[in-house]
């Protein structure tokens, strides 16, 4: 049986699964070490010796979302087909290469991942895929509007560079404190009286003051669960770019627990920063417990990082496992602690999105703005939003509640 070969063999089959997982990761799927271990154990338990059975066993572990299906299918056909002739693991016939052309974006992404320097095989790619390039829109415009989850490997690299190059305008806000000024409409009586002591009170020179202006800090709470993988990675590149600006940026990620990655993102190189951040997070591409993460943030971190009119960016799809009562309380507490709470939800990329999920309806009343975060245009609109005065009428979340009522 297959299970006996996997369990007692030389480990060649398990190594193939590891290489296959690396291919999926390079193609953009959120595949971590825990899923690789689960995949090997699943194949051992299933005891499958048929190609179709292996396909669905690995699919159940690696493809956690519907939009992962096309990439997984193309990767499976390309990867395991190249090993049929060499190791003769399967007795069935080869899959038709024409199936790889059904989703051009997925096929291209997997093909580029296979040609990665770290790939362990050379695969003859299908050459009969024809693209209709009779478009009037430039490549830059197409890339700006394309969903991150549908991008090829090269497009993802271009998107990361574009996000890193985005410049966030510096928007200053006035505080309650004052600073010295050479002119103005407000007199600093204390300094005037102190300065008059030098002349015995015979001469009093006017001394002015004005409100101090600061750049409000940004606090990001980023969901890194399985349903948010591709969007979270791109947004972390954006947060890394923000760290080079004049703003103070505090970054947190959460799945089933909260992790502070602010120091890890201080690395100058974005790849090193993302690698250091990933090493700190133990629940990447896992489940989601928004209420638990917000409770930990409100209890241990809010007083440290939410001063000086901080703006909170909450990046999540709102698919919650905790109770709505706890979630509503923590959201209300978070909103009262910050100057502005902006919810960035990739589900807004769907034209037919409605706020019907219980978690989404619980969170919306405590949000100042409700925005998409699925493309470069969405990130650019966010930059424009952060550079403007507080406007609660734009992207009003109450409109979504009224539509779903």
Image (cartoon, helix red, strand yellow):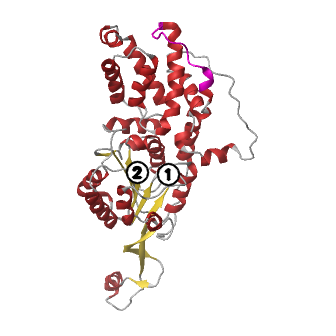
Give x and y (percent) for residue 261. 35, 44
The residue depicted at 56 percent of the width and 18 percent of the height is: 95
Circle 1 residues within 10 Å: few <14, some 14–19, many ≥20: many
**Residue 269 visible in the picture:** no
The range drawn in magenta is 87-99
Nearer to us in this view, 405 or 111: 405
Q: Main secondary structure of the magenta part?
A: loop
- Quarter placement of the N terminus: top left
**Vertical order, 192 against 359 (above or below):** below
**In the rendered image of this protein, does residue 228 appear above or below residue 371?**
above
Q: Disc 1 or 2, which lies upstream in sequence? A: 2
Quadrant including the C terminus: bottom left
Residue tagged 2 = 316
Residue at the spot 48% in from the left edge and 70% down from the top edge? 391
Binning the other alpha carbons within 10 Å of mark 2 as few (below 14), some (14 to 19) or many (20 upward) gives: many
Which residue appears farthest toward the left when viewing the image?
299
Report helix, strand or loop for mark 2: loop
Residue 348: horizontal and vertical position, in percent? 50, 54
| Image coords of residue 400 (percent x, y) | 46, 64
Q: CA distance from mark 1 to mark 2?
A: 10 Å
Q: In which image quadrant can residue 299 be found?
A: bottom left
Residue wearing tag 1: 373
């Amino acid at each position: 049986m297959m299970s006996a070969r996997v369990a007692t063999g030389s480990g060649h089959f398990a190594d193939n699964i590891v290489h296959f997982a690396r291919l999926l990761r390079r193609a953009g799927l959120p595949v971590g070490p825990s899923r690789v271990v689960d995949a090997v154990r699943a194949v051992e338990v299933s005891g499958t010796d048929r190609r179709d059975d292996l396909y669905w066993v690995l699919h159940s572990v690696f493809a956690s979302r519907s939009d992962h299906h096309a990439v997984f299918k193309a990767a499976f056909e390309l990867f395991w087909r190249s090993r049929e002739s060499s190791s003769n693991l399967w007795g069935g016939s080869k899959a038709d290469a024409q199936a790889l052309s059904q989703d051009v974006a997925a096929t291209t992404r997997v093909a580029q991942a296979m040609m990665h320097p770290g790939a362990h095989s050379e695969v003859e790619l299908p050459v009969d895929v024809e693209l209709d390039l009779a478009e009037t829109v430039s490549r830059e415009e197409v890339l700006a509007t394309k969903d991150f989850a549908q991008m090829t490997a090269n497009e993802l690299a271009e998107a990361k560079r574009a996000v890193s190059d985005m410049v966030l305008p510096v928007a200053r806000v006035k505080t309650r404190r004052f600073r010295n000024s050479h002119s103005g409409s407000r007199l600093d009586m204390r300094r005037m009286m102190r300065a008059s002591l030098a002349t015995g009170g015979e001469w009093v020179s006017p001394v002015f003051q004005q409100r101090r202006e600061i750049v409000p800090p940004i606090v990001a709470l980023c969901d890194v669960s399985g349903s948010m993988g591709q969007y979270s990675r791109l947004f972390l590149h954006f947060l890394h770019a923000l760290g080079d600006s004049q703003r103070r940026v505090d970054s947190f990620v959460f799945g089933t627990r909260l992790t502070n990655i602010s120091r890890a993102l201080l690395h100058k190189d974005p790849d090193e920063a993302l690698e250091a951040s990933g090493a700190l997070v133990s629940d990447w591409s896992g489940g989601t417990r928004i209420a638990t993460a917000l409770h930990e943030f409100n209890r241990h971190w809010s007083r440290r990082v939410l001063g000086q009119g901080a703006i909170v960016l909450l990046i999540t799809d709102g698919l919650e496992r905790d109770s709505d009562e706890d979630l509503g309380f923590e959201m209300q507490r978070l909103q009262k602690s910050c100057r502005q709470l902006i919810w960035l939800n990739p589900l807004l990329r769907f034209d037919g999105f409605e706020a019907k999920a219980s978690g989404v309806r619980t969170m919306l009343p405590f949000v100042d703005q409700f925005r998409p975060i699925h493309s470069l245009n969405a990130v650019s609109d966010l930059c424009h939003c952060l550079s403007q005065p507080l406007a609660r009428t734009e992207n009003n979340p109450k409109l979504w509640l009224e539509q779903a009522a």
